[in-house]
Image (tube, rainbow, N blue to C red):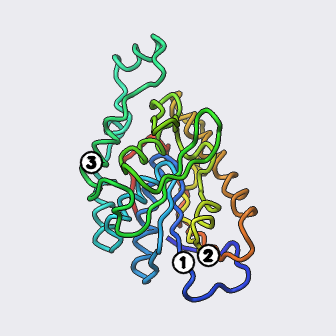
Amino acid sequence: MTAKVTHSTSPVPDNAKTAFVLAGGGSFGSVQVGMLRALVAHGLMANMVVGSSVGAMNAAFFAGMPTAEGVEKLAAIWRSLRRQDVFPITLRTLIGFIRRRDFLVEADGVRRLIDTHVPYRNLEEAKIPLHVVATDLLSGETIVLSKGSVAQAVLASTAIPAAFAPVQIESLYLADGAITCNTPVRVAIACGARRLIILPTGYACALETPPAGAIACALHALTLLIARQLLHELHGSTPTSNILLCRRSVRCSGRPTIFRRRTS
């Protein structure tokens, strides 16, 4: 992993709050493990973590154990993941979808990952403050979850429309945070951060042909859209903030639905 400063304005105070901002991007979220490993190794620590979509899942794991040991445990989780753990597509699920069910697969696999590996149950119990971003499916507004069930929050933030059912939290029907705020820069600033370290996921920039399969094509299109969304977020950030953008050091030709991927 390499990093570069993409937007830096007036110097911020040494005691300014630092936020790790973790973007969405399907299985490309695995690259964030390598970024976290490098940040921790260089002594860069966060006062808060803000995550959207798969970035919310990584953020939840990291907020529970924000150490080198915690990062290695997260790496082990990613290395063990297979597509069927998250997208268990079978003939039965396809038949159910054809029969006009509102979603393709149950989110049981995602919930199992959270319940098994996240060492706390409510967002406010994390070792460092955690803010999870989701989308209100009715109003289209960005919703920030900072209290309550971590499982429900992460399930909402990762609820890809059509693939997973929206998650109801109180009166809200919530879906994937990537729809409105894939890289929650402005959310982190609103939460009090003045030094932001962004962990993007990028997109498959080395493909020679389009991805095969409906879900793969849809997610690839989404990763292209959110790569552009990041530029909008950066241009809209306050001039009093200091932003560092982490960058992966290799080009990717994979697909955001393939979960067997290196984390370094």
Q: How far apart are marks 1 and 2 (CA)?
A: 6 Å
- Residue 93's x, y, as percent? 37, 20
Question: Residue lying furthest left in this view?
Answer: 116
| Amino acid on which disc 1 is placed | Lys
Q: Residue 17 carries which label?
A: 1
- Identify the residue at image location x=46%, y=59%: 31
Sequence-first disc among 1 and 2? 1
- Other-residue count near label 3 (Cα within 10 Å), few / some / many at <14 / 14–19 / ≥20: some
| Amino acid on which disc 3 is placed | Asp
Question: Secondary structure under badge 2?
Answer: loop
- The quadrant in which residue 190 appears is bottom right
Q: How far apart are marks 1 and 3 (CA)?
A: 29 Å
Q: Work out whether 144 lies above or below 208.
A: below
Sequence-first disc among 2 and 3? 3
Q: Work out whether 147 lies above or below 86.
A: below
Question: Secondary structure under badge 1?
Answer: loop
Q: Work out whether 79 lies above or below 209.
A: below
To which residue does mark 2 refer?
A: 194
To which residue does mark 3 refer?
A: 115
